[in-house]
Amino acid sequence: MKGCHVHIPYEKVEQYLPVIKKDRLSLEIYFKSNDLDSITKDDIIGLKKQLDYNSLLTIHAPFMDLSPAAIDSRVRTVTMERFSHALDIAGDLKAKVIVFHSGYEKWKYSLRPDLWLEGSLLTWNPLLKKADEIGVKIAIENIFEDDPTNLKLLMQNMPSNNFGICFDTGHFNLFSKISLGDWMDALNPYIIELHLHDNDKTSDQHRPIGDGSFDFDRFFEFLKNKDCIYTLEAHNAEDAKKSMERLTKYINL
């Protein structure tokens, strides 16, 4: 699974297709909820034809307003509908991994990761069964977590080679209150994908690797001999290019 992917919203694929095909980029395609409202089977078939150079793909599922650990069963039902649809698309595109946000916010769950875990398992167990059937791995991304307790609990309760962590460097840098080493001690065995971007700890800026305060040198020491997908989460083509150039310091592209 080793390789470098570039994150791109579905709506932007057409715009950047000449560059994507010229450089034979592997992509992580982000589908928003609004995309799911209008996308058709023909659209997916067309997308596969556009990416006819055997691109390696991952998928980023929608996340805005969705809550995989919702206490309200109707909210969780809507979340599962969106996630299941995204999984269908991942299967149709033969994606390797689909990334979902964890949905954990400590204040929202009254500082009780066990409460979040209870709802999470109701969502992820049936979705993992579906992912297994279509041959897609599920990766759960850290967002607002200031420590990895809830994510480790989820991994321990979802023991599967097809269910793991997408570690996001920018989110760690912005929100974590404990050291990178502590995060790696807790989650390194479960990491199957990385989201690589940087910031100065004031906001989620999605700067290129090395343009913020995250310690990538130390990070990649923790990841020696790790087999995972490296995804660049830049917000424009220039920053993606910078990150790709700087990533070569750490891995062979």
Image (cartoon, rainbow, N blue to C red):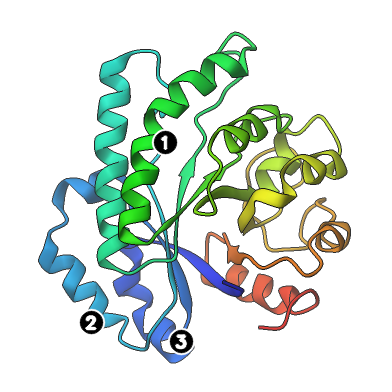
Amino acid at pointer 3 = Arg
Q: Residue at x 38, y 76 (%)?
A: 16
Q: CA distance from mark 3 to mark 2?
A: 14 Å
Q: Residue at x 46, y 44 (%)?
A: 100
Q: Which mark is residue 124?
A: 1
Q: CA distance from mark 1 to mark 2?
A: 31 Å
Q: Nearer the viewer, mark 1 or mark 2?
A: 1
Q: Is residue 64 visible?
A: no
Residue 250, given in percent of the width and then of the height, sits at: 79, 74
Q: Answer above or below: position of 219 versus 204.
A: below
Q: Answer above or below: position of 150 versus 185.
A: above
Number of marks in the rendered image: 3
206 vs 35, nearest the viewer: 35
**Dot 3 surroundings within 10 Å: few (below 14), some, or many (20 or more)?**
some
Residue 106, given in percent of the width and then of the height, sits at: 62, 18
Amino acid at pointer 2 = Lys
Q: Are marks 3 and 1 in contact (CB under 8 Å)?
A: no
Q: Is residue 176 visible?
A: yes
Give SS at disc 2. Answer: helix
**Quarter of the image with the C terminus in it:** bottom right
Give SS at disc 1. Answer: helix
Residue 23, given in percent of the width and then of the height, sits at: 49, 88
Drawn side of residue 117 relative to residue 144, left or right = left
Residue indicated by mark 3? 24
N-terminal of the pair, mark 3 or mark 1, is 3
Q: Residue at x 38, y 48 (%)?
A: 61
Residue indicated by mark 2? 49
Q: CA distance from mark 3 to mark 1?
A: 33 Å
**Dot 2 surroundings within 10 Å: few (below 14), some, or many (20 or more)?**
few
N-terminal of the pair, mark 3 or mark 2, is 3
N-terminal of the pair, mark 1 or mark 2, is 2
Drawn side of residue 174 relative to residue 59, left or right = right
